[in-house]
Image: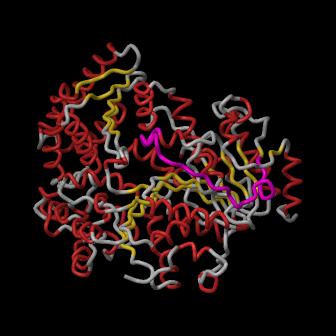
Amino acid sequence: MPTHPASSLTYFSDASPLRESWPGFTVRTEQRALAEAVENALSQRQPMALEAPTGTGKTLAYLLPVLMHSQRIIISVGNRTLQDHLWWGEYQKLRSCLPQVRPLTVLKGCENYICRWKLDEQLQTGERWVAENWQAISIGLQQTRSGEINTLPLPDAERAIATQQLTVTADQCLGQRCTQFGNCYFQQARTRAAQAEVLLINHTLLLSDNRLFEKGMGALLPVADAVVVDEAHQLPDLLVRFNTDMLDGYRLQRWLRQVRSACKEYFGLFPTLKSGLNQLESMWEKISHQLHQSGEDNLVQVAAVSLLPLLKLLMSLDVVLRQVQTAHAGIQSQLEQLQAWRSVLGHAIAEETVLQADTGGRWLRLIAGRVQSPFANLAATSANWIFISATLAVDNSFTWFKRILDLPQLQVQRFAGELDYARQAMLWIPESLPEPTDEAFMSAWIEQVLTVARDLDGGMLLLFSSHEALQNAAQLLQGRTDRQLLIHLPGSHRQQLLQQFRQNDQSLLLGTGSFWEGIDVSGAALRCIAIDKLPFTPPDDILALAWKFMAAKQGQHLFNDYMVPQAITRFRQGIGRLLRSSDDRGLILVGDTRLLRKPYGQRFLSSLPPVPVATSFAAVQAFFREQGLLRPD
């Protein structure tokens, strides 16, 4: 075992050896305090939730104590991109500066590894894409040691298809029942991971560990002394989504149309397909009619076993659709959706659970919840949990985070940020704008964005809560600005757009989804964050539907206790993209006047760092002038 200093805090002091070897290293008071809290939580086996604002240097603050400790520790980060960033970024720099740090092992989700069983199945059915790319697949299999899908020598354009054709999700994995279990790349990776001193995973894998263990994969968590969860603000959403399945009448109707269109030429060859589709449509309509009649309060409980006929019908359709697929019908995605529905009902019926039916809208939705939180009972596990994020508190309290994760006794600590929003930033909410529900809102909002764009010297990031709003905004901006428009659309390469954004400090980047967090752009490339409206989850989203049932069960208020806290967390994440260092400065532009007019608006505003609020565009111009951000004429 390498010899380490008695405390990792040595590396956050004036005498730190990182001063000479770590690029741009400075001693930060709050970073050292965070590192001390992590080290104490590890040593004292004290579960903690730690909020450290952007600019604290939180990755290094937890990574060094973890790598210097003697315990077996799992680090979980938000997604695969952050995994790669930590592995190739901070860890590799640390290893070059401090060769004595412990080795870090990386494990990704099973959908990142080639599934030998699925590959065999695709070969047997003569799947066209696999046949056309067999030479590259064969070469990759001979050369790969890890079995990761990205090691196959395929063009970038083919990688998404390769993942769809050659990998499985945690739910689809057969586990020990698989004929290829002994040769499974993912199982081999998990075996190595179980022996690691420090293991780096992502939240999806963290939440699927129980399911994989049940399939004979071996559990990671019981062999860990501690789990450090970075970007822990994602867990409330991920945990609910991960443990909630839905059968949605609208999606079922769309699925029926897609299958009928793709398979109509095969109805003669497979007569049971057409009758099966008609039977499914009829059965769902009957179920929907019965439940709508009994749904006085829009919430109806349904015994899963009563849906056994529906499950049997889905299973028979699965058999015939697999036969149709051998005739090269393009129905792979429809087959995967059907298998997902089968899995939902199969789990619910096997576990004799009660489903919740939402009858409040035109389309019936059946919600199936599974309580499989790995941290719902800290006393029952040997692992000590440490949750870290820049945005855990809502209303200056951790109540929301602790309630969703069912951790009422969790100890918490907040750290002051070292970024000076009072000096470096300004917030402007144009009071003349109509509310976001008004038809005139988007055009009026874009006028304000263009007003800022004409005066501001620097790039602007426009954040939207939906792709539809983003596309409408993009159309309104076309031809009305001399700035480069970078538009994130489905299928766009996120990292490529970000690279273009960094290189052109006069561009406008329009993003949604993942652009609200995990983006690190400094300097002139990002001088304004523009948010069209408060990022509330749509009421028909599976997340909102799950909250609806949780609120009824727990006696909470759906909007105030679930939707507002979640939107505040996302709002804080979006605004956190603006200032990344003490040299950054810029404008926060928000188009949602509900911040000023609605009672809950104050909850959003009070969640922000102390930032001056502009009362007019003249005040914004004065801020630009003072900060040297006025665009040259």
Q: Is residue 425 magenta?
A: yes
Q: Position of residue 19 (x, y in %)?
A: 64, 82
Q: Is residue 33 left or right of residue 333?
A: right
Task: Name the quadrant containing residue 583.
Answer: bottom right
Query: In this rendering, is residue 304 above or below 582?
Result: above
- Location of residue 354 (image quadrant): top left
Across and down, in percent, residue 38 comes to: 51, 62
Looking at the image, can residue 278 be seen?
no
Point out the stretch of residues depicted in magenta.
403-427
Which quarter of the rendered picture does the N terminus lie within?
bottom left
Residue in the foreground of this view, choosing between 300 and 618: 300
Locate residue 1 relative to residue 401 in the image: left or right.
left
Residue 32, image x and y in percent? 61, 67
| Colour setup of the view | secondary structure
From the viewer's perspective, is 202 left or right of 28? Answer: left
The C terminus - image quarter: bottom right
- Tell me the residue at 73%/39% (across/down): 444
| Camera-side residue of 316 and 73 | 73
**Does the segment drawn in magenta span residue 158?**
no
User: 540 above or below 377?
Assistant: above
